[in-house]
Amino acid sequence: MPRSRNPASTGPSILYAVKQVELAVRSRLDETLRPFGVTTIQYSALTVLEHRDNITSAALARRSFVTAQTMGDIVMALERRGYIVRHRDPAHARRLVIAVTDEGRGLLDEVREDVRLIELRMTTGMSDEERDELCRLLRTSLDNLVEPEESEQA
Amino acid sequence: MPRSRNPASTGPSILYAVKQVELAVRSRLDETLRPFGVTTIQYSALTVLEHRDNITSAALARRSFVTAQTMGDIVMALERRGYIVRHRDPAHARRLVIAVTDEGRGLLDEVREDVRLIELRMTTGMSDEERDELCRLLRTSLDNLVEPEESEQA
DNA sequence: CCAATTTCAGTTTAACTGATATTA
DNA sequence: CTAATATCAGTTTAACTGAAATTG
């Protein structure tokens, strides 16, 4: 296969680009979410919970690359606002499994369109194939970065 | 043009993927940078300064989507550690332009290889073309998200 | 006894807002 | 006068470490 250029040609610029895009996205998301009184971090956690119900705070922390204590604070903030509830896992009395409430789903529904507009703006000028490719390459990047040891069900 | 699928097919999952990848990258970068006593945020600012010398803290703030005060704190932290120096712009007495010191470049050199390893791990299994494509799509995303009003030279 | 989960306490960094002096 | 820059002060959120209780 023809290696068109040296492997370091792109340098550490992909990491830099990821960082910059995330900063830009967060800036836009903050504007969108401010009227609702939730932070981008809290919203991100809530979107994960929307798709992965009955997960514990500790598992959510591992998935988000933060400590259990940090995620504990975020989860408690969401609980205080009524967006989630927690109840004991019958099979595992130490665990508190999280469920998104109707209020939580309501919030997600309220901001869904605005969030989609940010994504549409970000991908302006891209073809559907390019959008799919970007998403696929980001997922691959994430898979490559996570520790392989993690084998949880939630 | 044949729109192969509905535009919402990928949903807001690209934003989610960007966020997750950034969290993963930051987690790895934190490990790498901890022995050097700099945070990922400080390091990111320093890499921008490496390529864009003679920029002001305020301009750096705009580029990084944070307030001037926030970037002021980060810049002062880098200054205290001796990684940058600031001096008055002769043409603009109010501005303090930033220059990376030899110590700053030394730090960047010391961590460059480790940072590159993170990027290599992240792009494991990708062809050179895919790496380039990922970088290109991220740059496009960033361009689409920045305010067009900004027309600074630095 | 050990590992995982949760939580309490304390600390630090990074973000914000608001206000102020300076200067082009 | 206005806008931009830098900075001072105060606040909040998000991250950490350390420690403790509980449970499998």
Image (spheres, coloured by chain):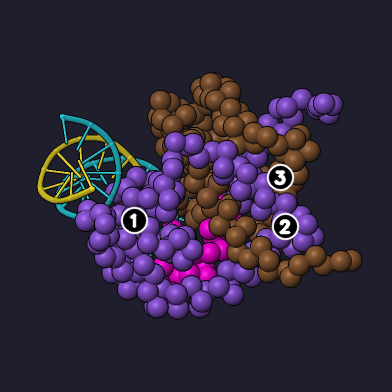
Chain colours: A brown, B purple, C yellow, D cyan
**Residue A143 position by quadrant:** bottom right
Query: Number of marks in the image?
Result: 3
Mark 1 lies on a secondary structure that is strand
Mark 3 in CB contact with mark 1 (< 8 angstroms): no
> Who's the residue at 74% across and 63% down the image?
B124
Pick the quarter of the image with the C terminus of chain B: bottom left
Q: In which chain is the residue bearing label 3?
A: A
Residue B39 lies in the magenta-colored region: yes
Q: Please check whether the numbered discs 3 and 1 fall on a single chain.
A: no
Residue B56 circle label: 1
Residue B68 lies in the magenta-colored region: no
Q: In which chain is the residue bearing label 2?
A: B
Q: Nearer the viewer, mark 3 or mark 1?
A: 1
With A145 as the anchor, is A75 left or right in this view?
left
Mark 3 lies on a secondary structure that is helix
Q: Residue furthest right?
A: A1
- Amino acid found under the numbered disc labelled 3: Leu
> Disc 2 or 1, which lies upstream in sequence?
1
Span shown in magenta: B22-41
**Marks 3 and 1, how far apart in space?**
33 Å
- Amino acid found under the numbered disc labelled 1: Thr
Q: Name the residue under label 2.
A: B131
> Who's the residue at 33% across and 50% down the image?
B58
Q: Mark 3 points at which residue?
A: A134
Pick the quarter of the image with the N terminus of chain B: top right
Relative vertical location of residue A24 with respect to residue B40 in this rendering, above or below: above
Mark 2 in CB contact with mark 3 (< 8 angstroms): no
- Amino acid found under the numbered disc labelled 2: Arg
Q: Is residue A65 visible?
A: no
